[in-house]
Amino acid sequence: MCTNQDLHIKGTGTTATVTNAEAMSRIWQSWVPRRFSSTKVSFDNIAEFHQDKSRPDQTLCFYSGGIDSTYTILKRVMSGKSQDLLTVLGMDYKAHDKTRFSDLIEKTSAFAKYASSTRILVEADVYAIYKPFKLNDKYHHVTHIFALAGVGFLHSRDYKSIVIAADRRLDQQFARGYYGSNSATNFLFDDGLTRLVTDSDNVTRTEKMPSLKQSPVSLQALTFCSDKRSRPLNCGVCSKCMRTKLMFVASTGAIPPLFQSDLIPNEWYKCFEYHYPIELSNLLDIIISAKYYGHTDALPFFTANEEHVLAFCRSGEAGIIAAMKEIGRIFRDLWVHS
Protein backbone atom coordinates (compact mmCIF):
# COMPACT_ATOMS: atom_id res chain seq x y z
CA MET A 1 0.00 0.00 0.00
CA CYS A 2 2.78 2.44 0.84
CA THR A 3 4.76 1.73 -2.35
CA ASN A 4 1.77 1.97 -4.73
CA GLN A 5 2.43 -1.51 -6.07
CA ASP A 6 0.37 -4.67 -6.46
CA LEU A 7 1.18 -7.70 -4.33
CA HIS A 8 1.79 -11.18 -5.74
CA ILE A 9 2.43 -14.01 -3.30
CA LYS A 10 4.31 -17.07 -4.47
CA GLY A 11 2.19 -19.84 -3.08
CA THR A 12 -1.40 -20.83 -2.51
CA GLY A 13 -4.11 -18.60 -1.08
CA THR A 14 -7.86 -18.28 -0.88
CA THR A 15 -10.38 -16.07 -2.62
CA ALA A 16 -11.38 -14.69 0.77
CA THR A 17 -7.81 -13.58 1.42
CA VAL A 18 -7.66 -11.74 -1.90
CA THR A 19 -11.07 -10.10 -1.47
CA ASN A 20 -10.46 -9.00 2.11
CA ALA A 21 -6.90 -7.78 1.57
CA GLU A 22 -7.95 -5.63 -1.39
CA ALA A 23 -10.91 -4.25 0.58
CA MET A 24 -8.58 -3.34 3.44
CA SER A 25 -6.22 -1.51 1.11
CA ARG A 26 -9.11 0.55 -0.27
CA ILE A 27 -10.12 1.57 3.25
CA TRP A 28 -6.59 2.63 4.12
CA GLN A 29 -6.35 4.63 0.92
CA SER A 30 -9.59 6.42 1.78
CA TRP A 31 -8.23 7.25 5.25
CA VAL A 32 -4.71 8.31 4.27
CA PRO A 33 -4.61 8.88 0.49
CA ARG A 34 -1.35 10.81 0.73
CA ARG A 35 0.39 7.75 2.15
CA PHE A 36 -1.44 4.59 1.00
CA SER A 37 -2.91 3.31 -2.26
CA SER A 38 -5.30 0.46 -3.00
CA THR A 39 -3.56 -2.76 -3.95
CA LYS A 40 -4.34 -5.74 -6.15
CA VAL A 41 -3.49 -9.08 -4.51
CA SER A 42 -2.81 -12.39 -6.23
CA PHE A 43 -1.38 -15.86 -5.56
CA ASP A 44 0.26 -18.46 -7.78
CA ASN A 45 -2.68 -20.72 -6.98
CA ILE A 46 -6.12 -20.22 -5.48
CA ALA A 47 -7.47 -23.05 -3.36
CA GLU A 48 -11.01 -23.06 -2.05
CA PHE A 49 -11.26 -24.59 1.38
CA HIS A 50 -14.52 -25.48 3.05
CA GLN A 51 -15.22 -25.17 6.73
CA ASP A 52 -14.71 -28.49 8.48
CA LYS A 53 -17.64 -28.67 10.89
CA SER A 54 -15.83 -31.35 12.87
CA ARG A 55 -12.90 -28.99 13.44
CA PRO A 56 -12.91 -27.73 17.05
CA ASP A 57 -13.82 -24.05 17.37
CA GLN A 58 -10.57 -23.21 19.11
CA THR A 59 -9.58 -19.65 19.95
CA LEU A 60 -6.16 -18.03 20.24
CA CYS A 61 -5.96 -14.78 22.22
CA PHE A 62 -3.17 -12.23 22.02
CA TYR A 63 -1.90 -11.61 25.55
CA SER A 64 0.60 -8.89 26.42
CA GLY A 65 -0.12 -8.38 30.11
CA GLY A 66 -1.71 -5.00 29.37
CA ILE A 67 -5.08 -3.66 30.46
CA ASP A 68 -6.95 -4.54 27.28
CA SER A 69 -5.81 -8.10 26.64
CA THR A 70 -6.07 -8.98 30.34
CA TYR A 71 -9.62 -7.66 30.54
CA THR A 72 -10.72 -9.46 27.39
CA ILE A 73 -9.26 -12.79 28.50
CA LEU A 74 -10.64 -12.39 32.05
CA LYS A 75 -14.09 -11.74 30.61
CA ARG A 76 -13.83 -14.89 28.49
CA VAL A 77 -12.74 -16.98 31.48
CA MET A 78 -15.60 -15.64 33.60
CA SER A 79 -17.99 -16.60 30.78
CA GLY A 80 -16.70 -20.17 30.78
CA LYS A 81 -14.86 -19.89 27.46
CA SER A 82 -11.58 -21.63 26.73
CA GLN A 83 -8.65 -20.18 24.81
CA ASP A 84 -4.95 -20.50 24.20
CA LEU A 85 -2.69 -17.49 24.67
CA LEU A 86 -0.11 -15.94 22.33
CA THR A 87 2.58 -13.55 23.58
CA VAL A 88 4.96 -11.94 21.10
CA LEU A 89 8.53 -10.77 21.68
CA GLY A 90 9.32 -7.95 19.27
CA MET A 91 6.31 -5.72 19.92
CA ASP A 92 6.26 -3.86 23.26
CA TYR A 93 9.59 -5.51 24.01
CA LYS A 94 12.21 -5.33 21.29
CA ALA A 95 13.53 -8.62 19.96
CA HIS A 96 16.90 -8.10 21.66
CA ASP A 97 15.34 -7.31 25.06
CA LYS A 98 15.08 -10.94 26.13
CA THR A 99 15.87 -10.33 29.81
CA ARG A 100 12.93 -7.99 30.38
CA PHE A 101 10.73 -10.21 28.23
CA SER A 102 11.58 -13.12 30.53
CA ASP A 103 10.60 -10.91 33.47
CA LEU A 104 7.30 -10.19 31.70
CA ILE A 105 6.61 -13.89 31.24
CA GLU A 106 7.30 -14.49 34.92
CA LYS A 107 5.10 -11.60 36.05
CA THR A 108 2.17 -12.75 33.91
CA SER A 109 2.58 -16.51 34.39
CA ALA A 110 0.00 -16.86 37.19
CA PHE A 111 -2.72 -15.18 35.13
CA ALA A 112 -1.72 -17.12 32.00
CA LYS A 113 -2.08 -20.40 33.89
CA TYR A 114 -5.40 -19.24 35.31
CA ALA A 115 -6.73 -18.41 31.85
CA SER A 116 -5.33 -21.25 29.75
CA SER A 117 -3.37 -24.48 29.72
CA THR A 118 -1.46 -23.37 26.62
CA ARG A 119 0.67 -20.27 26.13
CA ILE A 120 2.58 -19.80 22.89
CA LEU A 121 5.65 -17.54 22.84
CA VAL A 122 6.83 -16.16 19.50
CA GLU A 123 9.87 -14.04 18.69
CA ALA A 124 9.30 -11.88 15.62
CA ASP A 125 11.28 -8.76 14.78
CA VAL A 126 8.68 -7.68 12.24
CA TYR A 127 9.07 -3.98 13.00
CA ALA A 128 12.55 -4.08 11.46
CA ILE A 129 10.89 -4.77 8.09
CA TYR A 130 8.42 -1.89 8.40
CA LYS A 131 10.81 0.68 9.89
CA PRO A 132 12.36 1.96 6.60
CA PHE A 133 8.91 2.92 5.30
CA LYS A 134 8.27 5.34 8.21
CA LEU A 135 4.59 4.43 8.46
CA ASN A 136 4.00 5.30 12.11
CA ASP A 137 3.83 8.55 14.01
CA LYS A 138 3.24 9.20 17.69
CA TYR A 139 -0.55 9.01 17.63
CA HIS A 140 -1.24 7.07 14.45
CA HIS A 141 0.58 3.77 14.75
CA VAL A 142 -0.30 1.59 11.77
CA THR A 143 2.02 -1.39 11.44
CA HIS A 144 1.42 -3.22 14.72
CA ILE A 145 -1.82 -4.85 13.57
CA PHE A 146 -0.18 -6.22 10.42
CA ALA A 147 2.69 -7.57 12.52
CA LEU A 148 0.34 -9.17 15.05
CA ALA A 149 -1.97 -10.63 12.42
CA GLY A 150 1.01 -12.10 10.59
CA VAL A 151 2.23 -13.82 13.74
CA GLY A 152 -1.27 -14.95 14.68
CA PHE A 153 -2.05 -16.49 11.31
CA LEU A 154 1.10 -18.62 11.53
CA HIS A 155 -1.11 -20.69 13.84
CA SER A 156 -4.27 -20.52 11.74
CA ARG A 157 -4.24 -24.27 11.09
CA ASP A 158 -5.13 -24.87 14.73
CA TYR A 159 -7.58 -22.03 15.40
CA LYS A 160 -10.79 -20.69 13.88
CA SER A 161 -10.63 -17.39 15.76
CA ILE A 162 -7.70 -15.18 16.73
CA VAL A 163 -8.83 -12.63 19.31
CA ILE A 164 -7.31 -9.19 19.76
CA ALA A 165 -8.56 -6.83 22.44
CA ALA A 166 -9.87 -3.42 21.43
CA ASP A 167 -8.04 -0.61 23.17
CA ARG A 168 -10.96 1.78 22.75
CA ARG A 169 -14.73 1.75 22.63
CA LEU A 170 -16.10 2.07 19.12
CA ASP A 171 -17.08 5.73 19.43
CA GLN A 172 -13.60 6.54 20.77
CA GLN A 173 -12.09 4.93 17.70
CA PHE A 174 -13.96 7.51 15.61
CA ALA A 175 -12.58 10.33 17.77
CA ARG A 176 -9.04 8.97 17.57
CA GLY A 177 -8.89 8.81 13.79
CA TYR A 178 -7.05 6.17 11.79
CA TYR A 179 -5.04 3.63 13.75
CA GLY A 180 -3.65 0.18 12.97
CA SER A 181 -5.93 -1.97 15.12
CA ASN A 182 -9.55 -0.94 14.70
CA SER A 183 -13.02 -2.42 14.38
CA ALA A 184 -13.42 -1.20 10.79
CA THR A 185 -10.60 -3.25 9.26
CA ASN A 186 -9.55 -5.93 11.76
CA PHE A 187 -12.34 -8.28 10.65
CA LEU A 188 -10.86 -8.27 7.14
CA PHE A 189 -7.99 -10.38 8.39
CA ASP A 190 -9.95 -13.47 7.34
CA ASP A 191 -8.82 -16.21 4.95
CA GLY A 192 -12.18 -17.98 4.93
CA LEU A 193 -11.10 -20.48 7.57
CA THR A 194 -9.57 -18.37 10.33
CA ARG A 195 -10.49 -14.83 11.24
CA LEU A 196 -9.26 -12.04 13.47
CA VAL A 197 -11.86 -11.01 16.04
CA THR A 198 -11.82 -7.66 17.83
CA ASP A 199 -13.18 -8.08 21.35
CA SER A 200 -14.43 -5.55 23.92
CA ASP A 201 -14.98 -2.55 21.67
CA ASN A 202 -18.15 -1.84 23.66
CA VAL A 203 -16.30 -0.52 26.74
CA THR A 204 -13.77 2.22 27.38
CA ARG A 205 -10.50 1.44 29.07
CA THR A 206 -11.68 3.16 32.26
CA GLU A 207 -14.76 0.92 32.30
CA LYS A 208 -12.49 -2.13 32.30
CA MET A 209 -10.81 -1.22 35.58
CA PRO A 210 -13.45 -2.40 38.10
CA SER A 211 -13.41 -5.96 36.74
CA LEU A 212 -9.62 -6.06 36.84
CA LYS A 213 -9.46 -4.68 40.37
CA GLN A 214 -11.87 -7.35 41.59
CA SER A 215 -9.62 -10.12 40.22
CA PRO A 216 -6.36 -10.40 42.23
CA VAL A 217 -4.70 -12.73 39.73
CA SER A 218 -5.48 -10.30 36.91
CA LEU A 219 -4.45 -7.23 38.88
CA GLN A 220 -1.03 -8.54 39.86
CA ALA A 221 -0.22 -9.47 36.26
CA LEU A 222 -0.89 -6.03 34.78
CA THR A 223 2.04 -4.35 33.05
CA PHE A 224 1.67 -1.25 30.89
CA CYS A 225 4.53 1.13 31.75
CA SER A 226 6.05 3.14 28.91
CA ASP A 227 9.36 3.51 30.77
CA LYS A 228 11.49 0.72 29.33
CA ARG A 229 13.79 0.84 32.36
CA SER A 230 10.92 -0.10 34.69
CA ARG A 231 9.21 -2.80 32.65
CA PRO A 232 7.53 -5.08 33.44
CA LEU A 233 6.96 -3.12 36.67
CA ASN A 234 4.88 0.05 36.52
CA CYS A 235 6.77 3.21 37.46
CA GLY A 236 3.69 5.29 38.26
CA VAL A 237 5.24 8.40 36.71
CA CYS A 238 5.20 7.92 32.92
CA SER A 239 2.24 9.01 30.82
CA LYS A 240 0.72 5.51 30.61
CA CYS A 241 1.03 4.89 34.34
CA MET A 242 -0.42 8.29 35.22
CA ARG A 243 -3.33 7.75 32.84
CA THR A 244 -3.98 4.28 34.27
CA LYS A 245 -3.89 5.53 37.87
CA LEU A 246 -6.45 8.18 37.01
CA MET A 247 -8.65 5.61 35.29
CA PHE A 248 -8.55 3.35 38.34
CA VAL A 249 -9.47 6.23 40.65
CA ALA A 250 -12.25 7.44 38.35
CA SER A 251 -13.91 4.02 38.14
CA THR A 252 -13.07 2.43 41.52
CA GLY A 253 -12.20 5.31 43.84
CA ALA A 254 -8.67 4.14 44.65
CA ILE A 255 -5.28 3.26 43.21
CA PRO A 256 -4.44 -0.47 43.44
CA PRO A 257 -0.94 -1.55 44.62
CA LEU A 258 0.54 -1.73 41.14
CA PHE A 259 2.73 1.34 40.97
CA GLN A 260 6.11 2.37 42.30
CA SER A 261 4.62 5.84 42.83
CA ASP A 262 0.98 6.53 43.72
CA LEU A 263 1.19 10.31 43.45
CA ILE A 264 -1.33 12.21 41.32
CA PRO A 265 -0.58 15.91 40.68
CA ASN A 266 -3.19 18.54 41.48
CA GLU A 267 -3.32 19.66 37.84
CA TRP A 268 -3.56 16.15 36.47
CA TYR A 269 -5.13 17.28 33.21
CA LYS A 270 -1.65 18.55 32.25
CA CYS A 271 -0.43 14.93 32.16
CA PHE A 272 -2.21 14.62 28.81
CA GLU A 273 -1.28 16.15 25.47
CA TYR A 274 -4.96 16.91 25.06
CA HIS A 275 -4.40 18.97 21.92
CA TYR A 276 -4.35 15.57 20.20
CA PRO A 277 -7.78 13.90 19.75
CA ILE A 278 -6.54 10.57 21.11
CA GLU A 279 -5.32 12.17 24.35
CA LEU A 280 -8.40 14.36 24.70
CA SER A 281 -10.47 11.19 24.38
CA ASN A 282 -8.53 9.61 27.27
CA LEU A 283 -9.00 12.67 29.45
CA LEU A 284 -12.72 12.94 28.75
CA ASP A 285 -13.11 9.23 29.49
CA ILE A 286 -11.66 9.81 32.96
CA ILE A 287 -13.80 12.88 33.65
CA ILE A 288 -17.04 11.30 32.42
CA SER A 289 -16.35 8.02 34.24
CA ALA A 290 -15.53 9.73 37.55
CA LYS A 291 -18.92 11.44 37.46
CA TYR A 292 -20.72 8.27 36.37
CA TYR A 293 -19.14 6.07 39.07
CA GLY A 294 -19.40 8.79 41.74
CA HIS A 295 -15.68 9.15 42.43
CA THR A 296 -15.08 12.82 41.63
CA ASP A 297 -14.04 13.45 45.26
CA ALA A 298 -11.27 10.87 44.92
CA LEU A 299 -9.53 12.89 42.21
CA PRO A 300 -7.67 16.00 43.43
CA PHE A 301 -9.29 19.30 42.41
CA PHE A 302 -11.67 17.50 40.06
CA THR A 303 -13.85 20.52 39.25
CA ALA A 304 -10.90 22.76 38.40
CA ASN A 305 -9.39 20.11 36.13
CA GLU A 306 -12.72 19.49 34.43
CA GLU A 307 -13.25 23.20 33.84
CA HIS A 308 -9.85 23.56 32.17
CA VAL A 309 -10.61 20.69 29.79
CA LEU A 310 -14.15 21.80 28.95
CA ALA A 311 -12.99 25.38 28.41
CA PHE A 312 -10.44 24.11 25.91
CA CYS A 313 -13.12 22.08 24.11
CA ARG A 314 -15.54 25.01 23.95
CA SER A 315 -12.99 27.56 22.81
CA GLY A 316 -12.65 26.14 19.33
CA GLU A 317 -8.92 25.92 19.98
CA ALA A 318 -9.15 22.13 19.89
CA GLY A 319 -10.22 22.09 16.25
CA ILE A 320 -7.67 24.71 15.21
CA ILE A 321 -4.76 22.92 16.87
CA ALA A 322 -5.85 19.55 15.49
CA ALA A 323 -5.97 21.05 11.99
CA MET A 324 -2.51 22.61 12.40
CA LYS A 325 -1.05 19.33 13.56
CA GLU A 326 -2.64 17.53 10.62
CA ILE A 327 -1.13 20.06 8.22
CA GLY A 328 2.23 19.51 9.88
CA ARG A 329 1.86 15.75 9.42
CA ILE A 330 1.08 16.19 5.73
CA PHE A 331 4.19 18.31 5.14
CA ARG A 332 6.30 15.85 7.13
CA ASP A 333 5.00 12.96 5.02
CA LEU A 334 5.73 14.86 1.83
CA TRP A 335 9.27 15.51 3.05
CA VAL A 336 9.84 11.88 4.06
CA HIS A 337 8.50 10.44 0.80
CA SER A 338 10.02 13.03 -1.53
Image (spheres, rainbow, N blue to C red):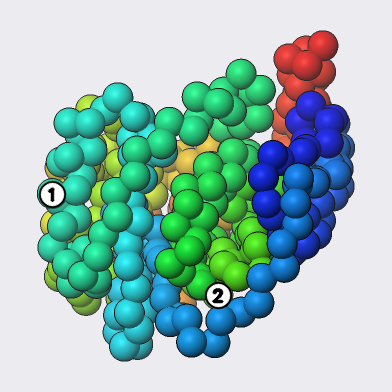
Q: 34 left or right of 86? A: right
Image location of residue 261, percent across then percent down: 18, 42
Amino acid type for the residue under numbered disc 1 = Glu
Image location of residue 86, percent across then percent down: 35, 56
**Residue found 83% across the figure and 31% down from its top:** 5
Quadrant (top left, top right, bottom left, bottom right) of the C terminus: top right
Residue denoted by label 2: 202
Label 1 sits on a secondary structure element that is helix
Amino acid type for the residue under numbered disc 2 = Asn
Task: Say which of 162 and 145 sits in front.
Answer: 162
Disc 2 to disc 1, C-alpha distance: 31 Å
> Total number of numbered labels?
2
Q: 213 left or right of 203? A: left
The answer to whether the residue labelled 2 contacts the one labelled 1, judged by CB atoms less than 8 Å apart, is no
**Residue found 47% across the figure and 81% down from its top:** 55
**Residue found 17% across the figure and 31% down from its top:** 99
**Residue found 48% across the figure and 41% down from its top:** 272
Q: Can residue 171 be spotted in the picture?
A: no
Mark closer to the observer (2, 1)? 1
Residue denoted by label 1: 106
Q: Is residue 166 above or below residue 240?
A: below
Q: Is residue 17 above or below residue 272?
A: below
Q: Can residue 4 be spotted in the picture?
A: yes
Mark 2 or mark 1, earlier in chain: 1
